[in-house]
Image: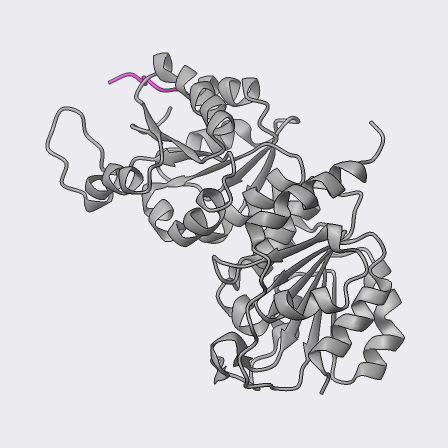
Amino acid sequence: MSALLTAGKIIDELRKCGITHLVWLPDTESQVVWEAANGQPDFTIVPVCREGEAIPIAVGLLLGGKTPVVVHQNTGFFESGDSVRALALDLHLPLLLLIGYRGWRRNSPITDSAAIFTEPILNAWGIKHYLLESDGDVGKISLAHKEAHETQRPVVVLLGMEIE
Amino acid sequence: MIDSLEAQRVISQHRGDAIVVTTMSTNFEWPQVSTNPDLDLMFSGAMGKASSVGLGLALARPDKKVIVLDGDGSLLMNLGSLVTIANMAPPNLIHFVFENKVYRTTGGQPIPDAGRLSFTGLAAAAGYANTYEFADLASLERNIEAVLSEAGPTFVCLKIVTVRERSPFPLTTFRSIIPRFRAALQRSSPPE
């Protein structure tokens, strides 16, 4: 099956959003985006050891006037939950997150609990989310970024497949 | 051993226009000695993440020094941040850890490996550019200018008197000071 979601399109869309920093722990879905972003002069990549670090680093960047995006997997989103609660949500900060949607399937039963719990948790926390499945969806990144700023809340873009 | 408030008084006297990020016990003590409260970020919630917020600020504002007043129990919750900070190597970040060997805000329970663990050793091994350890106030006073002027990231472990009484939580909430903090940062922006 040919790639439907390509790293270059995602990078272009992040550039349109004025993203300055990618705070990142690589995962299966987004690894190619890392490779595409690495070395780009207009992005600084901030690698983290554990996903829970990513939100407070992004908050520091936001407060300092930069425009970060947090990138990690849904498993890492669970890990960073208290930071999402205490910082992005409680402080009303416009944070964009790209989250690898491990286990998500459109045309077959979802059996991975990482995928089973992702959207219910986002919904429980009142976090708006969008699903990317193909290059035709990448405009949702800008939409999510705009919405995060309009609502002063975190907004999630779920990467619904491995990117090529 | 150093009295926590006295250590903060020394840091405050030399902080100039640096950003200061506090957490847990220092949230309550630092406002008593701060000379520049507009650039103070009292950080509570998401325990252990003050060093990470400080890293983000240091990367965003390389023109300003960023001082983090961390706790030993807090740092243990976010030890990976030592590696992340060393990897990004912001020269303007000074990371103090107040090693009082207890979780003071919950009544003084001992932190794991208290007294045997070397925070300075961990920071040095992670790759901080400079590491210091002070066990008396006079040593801190003698060295504070050098500590704050070196190209970082700089790590400073302060051996603090163990106090088991719970520190009160500050009345000011993190969220309420953010508009003031952001405005102060914007006022102090470097010319374009």
Q: Can residue A5 be found in the magenta stretch?
A: yes
The answer to whether any part of residue A7 appears in the image is no
- Residue A119 point in image, percent of width and height: 26, 36
Q: Residue shown at 63%/41% (left/top)?
A: A63
In this rendered view, identify the residue nearer to me: A146 or A140: A146
For the N terminus of chain B, give its image quadrant: bottom right
In this rendered view, identify the residue nearer to me: A33 or B137: B137
Which of the 4 image quarters holds residue B121? bottom right
Looking at this view, name the residue that lies furthest to the left.
Answer: A109
Q: Relative to A71, does residue B98 appear above or below in the rendering?
A: below
Q: How many marks?
A: 0
Q: Residue shown at 77%/68% (left/top)?
A: B33
Looking at this view, name the residue that lies furthest to the front.
Answer: B171
Span highlighted in magenta in the image: A1-7
- Residue B185 point in image, percent of width and height: 74, 41
- Residue B180 point in image, percent of width and height: 69, 44
The answer to whether any part of residue B26 appears in the image is yes
Q: Relative to B47, does residue B182 appear above or below in the rendering?
A: above
- Residue B93 point in image, percent of width and height: 72, 55
Secondary structure that dominates the magenta span: loop
Looking at this view, name the residue that lies furthest to the top.
Answer: A136
In this rendered view, identify the residue nearer to me: B132 or A61: A61
Q: Relative to B127, does residue A4 appear above or below in the rendering?
A: above
Instruction: Identify the colour scheme used.
Output: one colour
Left or right, A64 with respect to B174, comes to right
Left or right, A108 with respect to B140, comes to left
Left or right, A54 with respect to A67, comes to left
In this rendered view, identify the residue nearer to me: A118 or A13: A118
Q: Residue shown at 62%/54% (left/top)?
A: B85
For the C terminus of chain B, give its image quadrant: top right
Q: Can residue A122 be found in the magenta stretch?
A: no
Q: Residue shown at 82%/72% (left/top)?
A: B10
